[in-house]
Amino acid sequence: MDLIQILVNIGYVFMLAALTVRDILWLRGLLVSAQLSLFTYGMISGNIPVAFWNALFFIINSYQVVRLIQQRRPIDLPDDLIDLYEKIFLSMRRREFLYFWQMGEIHKVKHKRLIGKGEHQKNLLLILSGEVEIKKSGKLIAKLSRGSFVAEMSFLTGEPATADVFVPAIASYISWDQQKLHSLEQLNPDLLIKIQHILGKDLTTKLKKDSEIVLSLI
């Protein structure tokens, strides 16, 4: 078997291997190896179309490999977000978490009603500091603190609030526009699925604590 045949076979072996892997980075890397081998074959054999197209594919996939490596490179989180990430958002990569976080807006309020019963919610909230009270028919049914979502049920179902949410003293929270989050279905569906999973887990945790709280939450 001469060199040209060896190069062709190596190229196709790498392509076959690429079809067997699920990780996109490994797939791209194997394709780069295959296209480099076939490009070399094209140059040696004088087959310019083969050399040209595989050179083009090699450049495209090499760029994608570099981009994927950069995306997967570990990044540091701000100190004040580490506990929230480790407690709630571990199903997200850190880069995804920061992207999601930057979609929100932080607020600090004092003695304020955040949500009224029967209101359709435009925002998803996450408590950062202080406490909020959940009341139904004037009765206190829950207190939520740092790391608790508010209005997750509204986000998941689109139903109006079934309870009132008050800040009795001072609290801060981050809010995300629900419409923008739902737009992730087109822009980044994987991230939206992770957000929905996290919210579902938050509701399940509340259910374990007190079934009445979940049934009364927004």
Image (cartoon, rainbow, N blue to C red):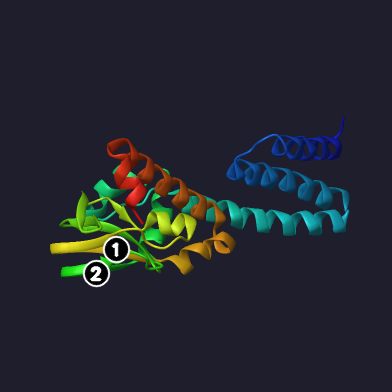
| Residue positioned 32% across, 36% down in the render | 208
Quarter that holds the N terminus: top right
| Element under disc 1 | strand
Q: For the residue carrying disc 1, how many other residues have a C-alpha within 10 Å: few (<14), some (14-19), or many (20+)? A: some
Check if mark 1's residue and mark 2's residue have beta carbons within 8 Å: yes
Q: Identify which residue, 180 or 157, lies in the foreground.
A: 157
Question: Would residue 22 be found to the left or right of residue 164 on screen?
Answer: right
Q: Which residue is mark 2?
A: 107
| Residue 145 seen anywhere in this rendered image of the structure | no
Q: Which residue is mark 1?
A: 174
Quarter residue 127 falls in: bottom left
Q: Identify which residue, 37 or 125, lies in the foreground.
A: 125
Quarter residue 205 falls in: top left
The correct choice, above or below, for 139 with respect to 187 in the image is above
What distance separates the C-alpha of mark 1 from that of mark 2? 6 Å
Quarter that holds the C terminus: bottom left
| Residue positioned 33% across, 53% down in the render | 217
Return the mark for residue 53: none
Amino acid type, callout 1: Ile
